[in-house]
Amino acid sequence: MSWLLNLILILIATAVVAWVFRFLGQKFTHNKPFFRDMPFAVAFGYVAGLLVLIAAVSYYFRPVEVNGVPSAGVIFFRWAVQGFIGFAIAAYLFRLFGRAVGTAGTRKLFRAMPLTAAFGVLVILLYAIVSIFAGSIAPYGQEEIFANANIVPGGNPMMGGDPNFPLGTDQIGRDIYSRLIYGAQNTVGIAFATTCLAFFVGGSLGFLAAIVGGWLDQILSRAVDVLMAIPALIFALLLMTIASVWSNQLGVDRTIFMVLIIAMIDSTRVYRLSRAVGQNIVVMDYIEAAKLRGEGMGYLIFKEILPNATAPLLAEFGLRFCFVFLTIASLSFLGVGIQPPLADWGTMVKDLSQFINFAAFAPNVATAPLLAAGAIALLTVAVNFVVDWMLHKSSGLKD
Amino acid sequence: MGSIFQIILQRLVLGILTLLIVSVVIFVAVNALPGDFAQAILGQGATEEAVAQIRADLGLDQNYFMRYFSWLANVLTGNLGISFAQMNFASNMGGDQLVGVVEQIAPRFKATMFLAGVTAMFAVPISITLGVLAALYRNSIFDRAVNITTLSSISSPEFFLAYILILVLAVLNPIFPSLSNVYEGMALGEKLNRTMLPALTLTLVVTAHMMRMTRAAIINLLASPYIEMARLKGIKPMRVIVRHALPNALAPIINVIALNLAYLITGVVVVEVVFVYPGIGQLFVDSVKIRDIPVVQACCLIFAAAYILLNLMADILSILSNPRLRHPK
């Protein structure tokens, strides 16, 4: 319980320092409004923030090795901080680049962009490039098996590494670096295709329900209500159980079933939104005019309603992509998603996860599963930052 | 008060109806399996007679309609069948001490509820405090830092957060055990200690969402005239929020807490697998892998029931906390 006592002492000390800080500020600046109107909590916040910063910096500069034993905590902390700062600088430069280059429209877009959104756009672009050109970036094939299994990441032969395999090899001797790159293609590609399918099905049905109304609307909406009453991941797992039997019987790849199942489950959510948006649009006069002109259903949906519903649907597309991506990663992590030999991040995390237990002695070894899991997290965080910015921009929320 | 009971009764009936239809969906999905269970239980080398025997035992020779209602009747009387793994074991090794699915699920369900309870105890106070503070100091560095952190933790997959926590709190600084093998009859302190890492992971996931909703709900209210009035009276900003804004923001906050509890009960699957926590999610995933249909069916039904129940509760509570909905015109 000594740490609890320490914590309380630190909090009390911080409070005292905060009070002194505010008091001195008021004295020396002759009651400038900044110090005069400062609530105690804010002073406390400043001091606590400063303390955390000092602690972090001093921890960062602690030696990485004590008597030849690596202090793993410091090493991981350095990696995390370097990654964070690296991405922040990259996002800043990217935003500068975007402000200087391009058409007037894109320059204006970049001028009002917060750093988090710039980070998001940059990461999404990077993932897109890696997943499209995975075949030429990756040094080896994703299914290539080498003689040496379980090579340690880091590329240092003294520590059990191999310069040819910078991130090592997995338990049956496949290059982890190549598999990470191919993972971008498989995991992101499959998630993207699934989201597109979900949007095509859910969007057209939602707009159809909005236009036709009546019994079709009733039937579709009630069916969607029922499907949404079952939690998504649970339903997906149930259907995957059944699909696994079917895929053995029919000889169809299980991954295709997974795409169809997740697209079906997520299209219900898309249906909800597009129906709600569509209902607001179909009452407009130009829809009436188009109907009187005798336009067909396809024209109404894709030429009249869709262009006017892009903003909410685009934001929804980002969010939906995140959900689909996370569901696929979770299913793969649980062992029923994307099937080997396709490289996939969720499966890689599962297969390599036991190496995290060696992190205290050999920090290098633990990087492989963390990189795979981090790759998933990075993309979803990036997409969420962009969607957050888009929603903020379109809703005009300023507070 | 007559009308309020009527509304609640209406919602209850609607909830039960939804659950019934969900049971139909689950039944149809399971019966879309090719081949039949009897073959699946006994494997390829089974004799004709054995297959026929099992078929008769399971009632597979009746039509779908009859089977659904007998299944439903069994479920309502608390008989969820016997798992295939158990049956297979019994048919190969002999012995008649079959453990029913109910006996299999009950301790698991208790463990999951314990995990969810511990998580809720952390998550609810933390998220409301953080939400109020973020609303109070909106657009400050603190607000932005909290915003970025919560957005990142919402969007990361659970297993990423789980492994980061294992790395920091179990491997680098051995504070909590990374495997949560709790069992019944364990001392509460030890049980809490072992549940801590999964609970913290889930807390990170749900806190983010609840905190953002609390912040948004309070900020929404800050533009209203009565808040302006309170401010002009010279009340301190903290008091304005806690005394004047928070009570009126309760409806959306209660709603989002209930929704997140629903998420907790169903979203534990991945976390339980990471920490090998003996909850219902772990059982569900294991059964999915070996296609143990009775267990999968039962777990699915329980998850759906919990989900529907909590959503129903959120609905009713938000009606109760809003006078305008409590007295409909």
Image (tube, coloured by chain):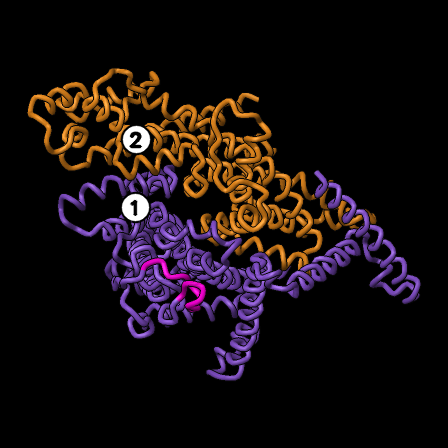
The shade of chain B is orange
**Does A315 appear above or below A98?**
above
Marks 1/2: CA–CA distance? 17 Å
Q: Circle 1 sits on which residue?
A: A336
| Residue receiving disc 2 | B297
Does the rendering let one see residue B83? Answer: yes
Q: Secondary structure at mark 1?
A: loop
Camera-nearest residue between B118 and A226? B118
Query: Residue B61 in the image: x percent, y percent?
Result: 12, 22
Q: Residue at x 27, y 28 (%)?
A: B294
Q: Are marks 1 and 2 in contact (CB under 8 Å)?
A: no
Which quadrant of the figure contains the N terminus of chain A?
top right
Amino acid type, label 2: Gln
Residue at the spot x=19%, y=24% of the render? Answer: B92
x 81%, y 50%: residue? A13
Numbered range of the magenta stretch:
A149-161
Q: Observer-nearest residue: A113 or A20?
A: A20
